[in-house]
Image: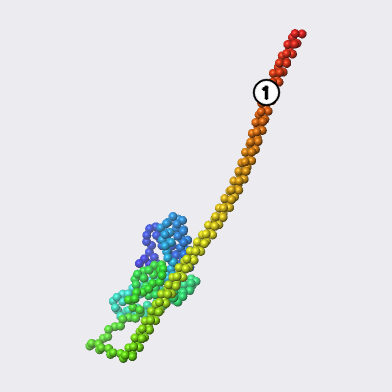
């Protein structure tokens, strides 16, 4: 047993303690908030790269309201839990050894403690904002009786991570000690036969009691099934709510990206228009440059021709002056 009296012994590698703490935290969370809290912790583990931790956290099952109340009891009342587990060991030992006197005393003590602890569980659940129905309180009592009767059930309850209520084994005494053998010197006298009418009434009463017991068991099973179905419905609604929130976030992100793309496309159009305008201006400037270059070349040719004519005329005028 890893846990006794509300205390856990850490096992595993370096990350095991972290996962165990997260699971303890989850099973201390009310059922209505279990699924969102579980998904948040699993997402955090995935973000941190701890895939195996995320898988273990995501695989945690949501407890029923009665199972959560039983978990809350062992977490909040460690000393009472320890004494209750010790009582279960003593009661099972008395049952094995058929210690009639001890079994009778322990059974009476068991009834008182089961009633007291179930009331404490209901009180703790109410203080946490979740009132237990009569069916849920009966499931808590069934769990506590199972803890006394079955060591495996005791181990599960001590872990504080019950998912559903526990059922005590049918072969464990319901609370009455076995009768001690009669202290007689001689053989016991044969029982006198009951009158036919009395025997018929006894059989009718027994049959009526049996039918009532079966109806009560069927009612308890139906209530447990209804509680489980309600829990599954709450889980499904919580998953739907989470998915809807994710969809809203995705829509918001898509709108933001579309706006960013539209702004970028507008900027790109403006840039392309600037580019087209710059290219047109460059073509006009190039054409002006070519025209100016042609004009310069023509002017240079004209200037050279004029200079040659001037040189010829000047030379001719000099020759005329020498002959006079």
Residue 114 spot, x, y in % from top left: 40, 76
Rendering coords of residue 77 (x, y %): 42, 71
In this rendered view, identify the residue nearer to me: 233 or 123.
Answer: 233
Left or right, 227 with respect to 294, comes to: left
Q: Is residue 75 visible?
A: no
The residue shown at (69%, 25%) is 299
Q: Residues within 10 Å of mark 1 (few under 14, many from 20)?
A: few
Which residue sits at x=31%, y=90%? 196
Q: Secondary structure at mark 1?
A: helix
Work out whether 4 lies above or below 253: below
- In the image, taking residue 296 as reference, residue 19 lies left or right, namely left
Q: Which residue is mark 1?
A: 301
Residue drawn 38% across the image and 84% down it: 208
Quadrant where the image shows the N terminus:
bottom left
Q: Please tell me in which quadrant of the rendered image residue 152 appears.
A: bottom left
Left or right position of 111 against 314: left
Asked if 85 appears above or below 199 in the picture, the reply is above
Residue at the (77%, 8%) spot, across then down: 324
Asked if residue 317 can be seen in this view, the reply is yes
Q: Position of residue 318 (x, y in %)?
A: 73, 12
- x, y percentage for residue 93? 31, 75
Q: List the single residue furthest toward the top.
A: 323
* Quadrant assignment, res 320: top right
Exactly how many numbered labels are in the figure?
Answer: 1
């Amino acid at each position: 047993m890893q846990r006794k009296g509300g205390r856990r012994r850490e096992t595993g590698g370096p990350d095991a303690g972290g996962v165990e703490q997260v699971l303890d935290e989850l099973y201390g969370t009310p059922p209505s908030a279990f699924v969102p809290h579980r998904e948040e912790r699993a997402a955090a583990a995935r973000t941190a790269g701890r895939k195996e931790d995320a898988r273990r956290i995501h695989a945690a099952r949501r407890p029923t309201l009665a199972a959560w109340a039983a978990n809350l009891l062992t977490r909040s009342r460690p000393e009472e839990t320890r004494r209750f587990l010790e009582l279960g060991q003593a009661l099972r030992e008395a049952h094995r050894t058929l210690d009639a006197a001890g079994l009778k005393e322990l059974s009476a003590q068991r009834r008182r403690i089961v009633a007291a602890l179930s009331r404490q569980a209901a009180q703790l659940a109410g203080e946490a904002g979740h009132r237990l129905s009569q069916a849920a309180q009966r499931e808590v009592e069934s769990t506590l009786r199972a803890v006394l009767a079955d060591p495996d059930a005791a181990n599960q309850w001590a872990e504080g991570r019950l998912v559903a209520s526990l059922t005590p084994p049918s072969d464990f005494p319901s609370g009455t000690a076995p009768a001690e053998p009669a202290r007689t010197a001689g053989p016991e006298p044969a029982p006198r036969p009951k009158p036919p009418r009395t025997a018929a009434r006894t059989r009718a009463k027994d049959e009526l009691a049996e039918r009532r017991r079966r109806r009560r068991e069927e009612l308890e099973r139906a209530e447990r099934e209804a509680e489980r179905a309600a829990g599954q419905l709450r889980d499904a609604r919580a998953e739907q709510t989470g998915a809807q929130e994710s969809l809203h976030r995705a829509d918001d992100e898509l709108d933001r990206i579309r706006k960013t793309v539209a702004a970028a496309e507008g900027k790109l159009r403006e840039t392309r228009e600037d580019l087209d305008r710059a290219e047109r201006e460059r073509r006009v400037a190039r054409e002006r440059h070519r025209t100016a270059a042609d004009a310069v070349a023509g002017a240079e040719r004209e200037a050279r021709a004029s200079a040659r004519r001037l040189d010829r005329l000047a030379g001719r005028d000099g020759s005329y002056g020498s002959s006079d």
